[in-house]
Structure formats: structure tokens, C-alpha cells
Image (cartoon, grey):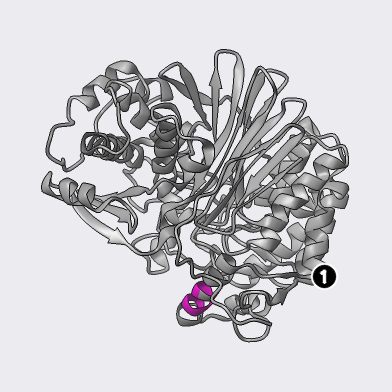
């Protein structure tokens, strides 16, 4: 075989958006995209395709998500948008006192303490039961096959697998972590590009979920295995915690931005941060994307929205302000007035009282799905339930151990959640799903691709390919290495602490599908920063 560098791209290239009539699946991994398309071709709808793609991604991109993670979805069907919150709660018997009693002053990244009840399998089941056309055992078939027979590891996947392996080898020393290495590094190393990886445990688990409509995971044999592993190795999750879980249908939230309605899942997700930033920005006029004024105001609005999110967003049952209060035009105007010529040090306001995968699907019937799924921080907690392939998430890391904080840890509480799917409508018509995964980059990515699309008229692929920036904290802003250097210099002159980043994957990975309401033609873009693919029909 010819020897070459799988990750070297010495020549700048452009990629067109993809067009189709019968169906589109866009995601970060080619095999998963193709699995979703095959479901459409077998008579399934966009919802079936989304589930098939999501399940396949737990196998074909385990560096970003897994069976033991969470999921959120926005589903357009029959002229209405539906929201699904597939995030789990903290175990009932965990508390700040117990965590501090184990010697922690903040929530750890790894091990059992940050593990919350996994919601992804429950989300698949809810989507299938409410809107799917095909049986779950048919929808998960390709994912099971890839887990059982194996698949060749793709370039970006290999890169992040190796990074996780080196980090886990250095940091995860307890016996409870050995099952991660047995599952994801069975030969003593991370698989390289083109090497075939498989997991029989993963296949068996997916098959059990498919054959029982998720019952095994929450109230059957898989639930017993998860709870037993937790009990044996110092965890808090019990069979009762798992049995009580059910993904929740929620009403999506939105703001109107220049005649379009931008939709997100309500808290505990951070989609409200993207909406608040856009609500601030809609009070300005933008004529050019490549403008110092544009970049400066985008960054400043994002900072103001994000510090509010950090302070106010958590499980909605525990929030001190409502969504309507945070997204009111009056509060947006109050925050907008804080944007001056110089970079500000952001502080949260007080409204008037009162490691992730993303995919998008669409079919010829007009159904569209915006779906996101994650373990958090790549592989999550570092824990894999023995013999199952279930890599458990570490979402609880976002809980605060300060009892006075709105997102303070409590048993049975949902934490502030980073993963957010987006959707765009105009009037009573669906425009389509969009999303950018990547931890705290996600609302920032949503703002940038929406403005690229609406304000600056970029087609989906160009809207995703455009160089990105990311506010980190204080006045610190990272920009991609291909971000225009003269604008980076000018932003620094205005007081921003600009840092040029070499790692492009820190800036999120996104997908977009827009639908022409007159012709039904679908146009899609996918992420060029990873192994992104669009399967069309």
C-alpha cells in the first residue's frame, strides 16, 4: 500500500454543498451517515435515520459519544417542531457533602462521581415510539454489524483515540478503569488509521436495547450490570435511578432573528446562551462578515450571554429566572448597551425578576431532525461497564460544589448541559436543522453559522468552513490559525487577548441541512474539520 500522511492537507480546497430530493444524512463519520441513508432507502423516515446514525456513531466515533451518554433532539414533522431532552439526573443518593467527604473541592472529571444516568438509549426509544416507522431492531442493525464485525478507523477518529489513550494511561490508575482499556485499547494501544476495531460487548448491548425497546438498559439485565459495577467500585448509581429514567418531551424555545425563528432546547441545555447572544446582536446592523466591527460585537455579545448562562442556567426546576425573562428584548437591550469599542471584562447580569457528535437528517416527506449526542470530554468518565461496551458519561463534572450556586450538586438533579441541537424556521415553514458540537464552543458555533447564513448569505458548506473564533474566559479569545491575521491584530488592539490555536477541532464540528419550501430540494453542508460526510439520495 502507498504510504501517506492521513492528516496532511497542504493545499487549500473548496467543497460544495450537497443537494438532494429524497433524503439527506449529514454527520461527522461516513459510515454512520451511510447507515442513516440506508434506513431512508428501506422505507424509514428522517427520525429512523437519525436513530440509526446516532447508534452507529457510538461505534464508529466512540471518542465523542457512547451508549452511556446523553442526547437531545429537535424534530420537525407534520408542520410542528418537537423537542426531546435525553439528559439524565444525578444519582439520588449523591450530595455535596458526600463528594467533599471523599476529598474533593470540585467535581472530578473521571470515575463515578461525575456519572449521571445515561439518557441516549432512552432518547432513541422515545423518538422511535413517537415518530419512527421501522422497528428499533431494524434501525440499529448497521450499528450492531459494525460493532460485531468491525470497521476501519478513520483519520480524525484515530487522532483523538490516541490522544485519549495517552491521557487515560497517564491519569486513570484504579482497577475500575481497566475495562476502558480492555474495550478501546485491546492490543495495548489506540487503533491507527485504517486499523479495524470491533467490540462484541457493544454489539450485544445494542442488540439487547433493540430487542427490548430499551427496557434491558433501564429495567433489565443491562441495568443490573450497570448498578452492580457501580456498587462494586464505589459508584452512586442504583437500579432505582436507572428504572426511573425517561427521556422528556419539551417545548423548544426561540427568538426571532431578522425574520427567522432560531430554535433551541430549553434549559438545562445551554441553547439559551446562543439565543441570548443573537437577541443582543439583532440590535446591530451588519453589512460585512469580514469586518472588525462584526467580529468585535459578536465576541462581546457572546461573552455577555455566556456569563449569564454560567450563573443562571441549570435544571429548570432550580432556575431563579425564567427563559422569557432571560430572552426578553428589554434585557437584551440592557446587555447590548454594555458593548463598547474596547473589549470588556464580562460580568453576569440580573434579568428583571421573573467530546460530542451532531447529526442532521431530512426526508422527502418534509421530516427533519437535529440531533446531538455526547459522553462529554471525549470518552467520558473513563468507566466502561464490563463486557458491555457501555462507556459512561461524566456530565456531572459541570455541577458546582458551592451550595449557593444555581447549578449546585443535588441528588436527582439535572446539571447545566453543553450539548444543543438547533433548528431554523421562517413563518410556518421549516428551513432546517443545524448544529455545531464541541463543549462550550457550541452556542458560539451556533451564533457564527446562523449569522454566516442569514446576515452574510453563505451556503451551508461555506457557513461551516468559515474560520471560527471562541471566547474562553475574561478577555481571552482563541481564533483558528486560518483566521484573518489582520483582524486578529486589530481585535488585540481593541483589548482582546487573542490566541491563535493550531488545533482546529477545538472549534467544533457542525452540520446544516436547509430545505427549499417551494421545491422540496435539500441542500447540506458537513464539517471539514473532521471526517465529515453527507449521504444523499
Q: Nearer the viewer, residue 218 or 293?
A: 293
Q: Is residue 471 left or right of residue 196?
A: left
Give the percent coordinates (x, y) of residue 493.
Answer: 11, 48
Can the viewer see residue 124?
A: no
Residue 337 appears in which quarter of the rendering? top left
Q: Nearer the viewer, residue 419 or 37?
A: 37
Q: Please tell me whether residue 521 is drawn above or below residue 428 in the rendered image.
A: below
Q: Main secondary structure of the magenta part?
A: helix
Residue 346 appears in which quarter of the rendering? top left
Query: For the point 60% across and 72% down, which residue is it?
Result: 233
Query: For the point 59% across and 54% down, which residue is it?
Result: 532
Asked if the magenta segment contains residue 348, the reply would be no
Give the percent coordinates (x, y) of residue 510.
Answer: 52, 46
Q: Is residue 517 left or right of residue 285?
A: right
Q: Looking at the image, which residue sits at the far top?
A: 427
Can the viewer see residue 293?
A: yes
Quarter the C terminus occupies: top right
Q: Please tell me whether residue 464 is drawn above or below residue 433 in the rendered image.
A: below
Write down the region rendered in magenta. 163-168
Mark 1 highlights which residue? 149
Query: For the point 46% across and 36% down, which residue is it?
Result: 271
Amino acid at each position: 500500500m502507498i504510504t501517506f500522511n492521513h492528516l496532511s492537507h497542504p493545499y487549500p480546497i473548496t467543497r460544495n454543498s450537497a443537494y438532494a430530493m429524497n433524503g439527506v444524512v449529514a454527520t461527522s463519520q461516513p459510515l454512520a451517515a451511510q447507515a442513516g441513508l440506508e434506513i431512508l432507502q428501506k422505507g424509514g423516515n428522517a427520525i429512523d435515520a437519525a436513530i440509526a446514525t446516532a447508534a452507529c456513531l457510538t461505534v464508529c466515533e466512540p471518542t465523542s459519544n457512547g451508549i452511556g451518554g446523553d442526547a437531545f433532539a429537535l424534530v420537525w414533522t407534520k408542520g410542528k417542531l418537537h423537542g426531546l431532552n435525553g439528559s439524565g439526573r444525578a444519582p439520588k443518593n449523591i450530595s455535596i457533602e458526600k463528594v467533599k467527604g471523599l476529598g474533593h473541592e470540585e467535581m472530578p472529571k473521571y470515575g463515578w462521581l461525575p456519572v449521571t444516568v445515561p439518557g441516549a438509549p432512552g432518547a432513541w426509544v422515545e423518538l422511535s415510539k413517537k415518530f419512527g416507522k421501522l422497528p428499533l431492531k431494524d434501525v440499529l442493525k448497521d450499528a450492531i454489524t459494525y460493532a460485531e464485525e468491525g470497521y476501519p478507523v478513520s483519520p480524525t477518529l484515530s487522532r483523538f483515540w490516541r490522544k485519549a489513550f495517552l491521557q487515560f494511561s497517564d491519569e486513570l490508575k484504579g482497577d475500575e478503569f481497566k475495562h476502558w482499556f480492555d474495550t478501546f485499547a485491546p492490543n495495548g494501544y489506540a487503533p491507527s488509521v485504517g486499523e479495524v476495531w470491533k467490540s462484541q460487548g457493544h454489539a450485544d448491548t445494542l442488540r439487547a436495547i433493540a430487542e427490548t425497546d430499551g427496557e434491558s438498559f433501564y429495567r433489565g439485565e443491562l441495568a443490573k450490570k450497570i448498578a452492580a459495577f457501580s456498587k462494586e467500585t464505589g459508584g452512586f448509581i442504583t437500579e432505582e435511578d436507572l428504572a426511573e429514567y425517561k427521556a422528556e418531551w419539551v417545548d423548544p424555545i426561540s427568538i426571532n432573528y431578522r425574520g427567522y425563528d432560531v430554535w433551541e432546547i430549553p434549559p438545562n441545555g445551554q441553547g439559551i446562551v446562543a439565543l441570548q447572544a443573537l437577541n443582543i446582536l439583532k440590535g446591530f446592523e451588519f453589512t460585512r462578515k469580514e469586518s472588525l466591527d462584526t467580529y468585535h460585537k459578536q465576541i462581546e455579545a457572546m461573552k455577555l450571554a455566556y456569563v449569564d448562562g454560567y450563573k443562571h442556567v441549570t435544571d429548570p426546576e432550580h432556575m431563579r429566572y425564567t427563559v422569557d425573562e432571560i430572552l426578553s428584548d428589554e434585557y437584551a437591550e440592557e446587555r447590548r448597551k454594555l458593548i463598547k469599542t474596547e473589549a470588556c471584562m464580562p460580568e453576569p447580569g440580573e434579568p428583571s425578576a421573573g467530546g460530542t457528535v451532531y447529526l442532521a437528517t431530512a426526508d422527502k416527506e418534509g421530516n427533519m431532525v437535529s440531533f446531538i449526542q455526547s459522553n462529554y470530554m471525549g470518552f467520558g468518565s473513563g468507566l466502561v461497564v464490563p463486557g458491555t461496551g457501555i462507556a459512561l458519561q461524566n456530565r456531572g463534572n459541570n455541577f458546582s460544589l458551592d451550595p449557593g450556586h444555581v447549578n449546585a450538586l443535588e441528588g436527582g438533579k439535572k446539571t447545566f448541559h453543553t450539548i444543543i441541537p438547533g433548528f431554523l424556521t421562517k413563518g410556518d415553514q421549516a428551513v432546517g436543522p443545524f448544529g455545531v458540537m464541541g463543549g462550550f464552543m457550541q452556542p458560539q458555533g451556533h451564533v457564527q453559522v446562523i449569522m454566516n447564513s442569514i446576515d452574510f448569505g453563505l451556503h451551508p458548506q461555506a457557513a461551516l468552513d468559515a474560520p471560527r473564533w471562541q471566547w474562553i474566559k475574561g478577555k481571552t479569545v482563541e481564533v483558528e490559525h486560518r483566521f484573518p491575521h489582520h483582524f486578529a491584530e486589530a481585535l488585540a488592539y481593541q483589548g482582546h487577548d487573542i490566541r491563535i490555536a493550531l488545533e482546529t477541532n477545538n472549534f467544533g464540528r457542525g452540520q446544516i441541512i436547509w430545505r427549499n419550501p417551494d421545491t422540496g430540494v435539500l441542500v447540506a453542508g458537513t464539517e471539514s474539520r473532521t471526517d465529515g460526510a453527507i449521504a444523499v439520495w
